[in-house]
C-alpha cells in the first residue's frame, strides 16, 4: 500500500501541470489570432473557442519560422469538442522550406459548442514563437434549399394575387 501511494505521488509530482486553456474570440472579420512563445522543451497549448455562426465553415493555419537555433516543431494540432477529436490539422510544409506550416480547411463546426484547440510540440529554446489564425464563415445554403425558398415565395405570390382578384 505504501509503495503504491509513494509511486502515485512521485508520478503526480513529476507530471507537468497543465495551464488553464486560453479563451479565443473571433473579431469583426470572424478571425481569431494566436501568438505564443512556449518555454523550451515539450509543450501542449490549449485554447477554447466558439464559432460565431449556427453552421460554420472553419479553417485555420499555424506557422513557425526556422531562425538559427530558434525552432518549434509541432507534433500535432487538433480540434475537439471536449471529449472527442473532431479534426486534425495537416502539416503542409517543413523546416526544409524555412518554415513549418499546418492547415485545416472546410471543417464544419456549430455555434453554441465550446471547442478546444490543442497544439503539441517542442520548442528548441525559450523565446521561440508560433503564430496562428482561425477563420469562420457562414455556411452557404445548398441549391436545393434555395429552390425550396424560391418555390415558397412563388406560392405566397400566387396566393396573394388570387386574393386580389
Image (cartoon, grey):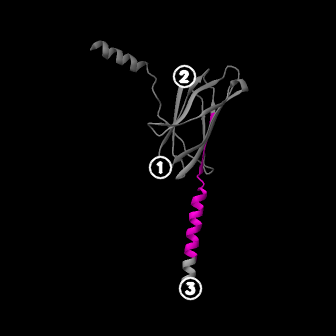
- State the residue position of label 2: 42
Q: Where is residue 156 in the image (x, y as percent from the top left)?
A: 55, 74
Nearer-N-terminus badge (2/1): 2
The quarter holding residue 141 reads bottom right
Residue in the foreground of this view, choosing between 39 and 6 = 6
Image vertical order of residue 94 relative to residue 51, above or below? above
Where does the magenta region start and end?
131-157
Q: How far is the residue under mark 2 from the one under mark 1?
A: 32 Å
Element under label 1? loop
Local secondary structure at mark 2: strand
Whether residue 32 is visible, yes or no, is no
The stretch drawn in magenta includes residue 56: no
Q: Do the residues labelled 3 and 1 touch (CB within 8 Å)?
A: no
Asked if the stretch drawn in magenta spans residue 142, the answer is: yes
Say which residue label 3 marks.
164
Disc on the earlier residue, 3 or 2 = 2
Mark 3 vs mark 1: give the one in front. 3
Q: Is residue 16 above or below residue 80?
A: above
Amino acid at each position: 500500500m505504501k509503495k503504491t501511494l509513494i509511486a502515485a505521488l512521485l508520478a503526480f509530482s513529476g507530471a507537468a501541470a497543465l495551464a488553464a486553456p486560453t479563451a479565443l474570440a473571433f473579431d469583426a472579420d470572424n478571425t481569431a489570432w494566436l501568438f505564443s512563445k512556449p518555454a523550451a522543451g515539450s509543450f501542449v497549448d490549449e485554447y477554447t473557442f466558439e464559432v460565431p455562426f449556427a453552421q460554420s465553415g472553419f479553417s485555420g493555419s499555424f506557422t513557425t519560422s526556422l531562425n538559427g537555433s530558434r525552432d518549434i516543431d509541432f507534433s500535432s494540432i487538433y480540434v475537439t469538442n471536449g471529449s472527442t477529436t473532431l479534426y486534425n490539422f495537416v502539416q503542409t510544409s517543413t523546416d526544409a522550406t524555412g518554415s513549418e506550416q499546418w492547415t485545416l480547411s472546410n471543417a464544419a463546426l456549430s455555434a453554441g459548442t465550446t471547442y478546444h484547440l490543442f497544439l503539441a510540440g517542442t520548442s528548441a529554446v525559450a523565446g521561440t514563437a508560433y503564430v496562428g489564425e482561425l477563420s469562420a464563415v457562414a455556411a452557404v445554403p445548398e441549391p436545393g434549399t434555395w429552390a425550396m425558398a424560391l418555390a415558397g415565395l412563388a406560392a405566397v405570390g400566387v396566393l396573394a394575387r388570387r386574393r386580389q382578384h
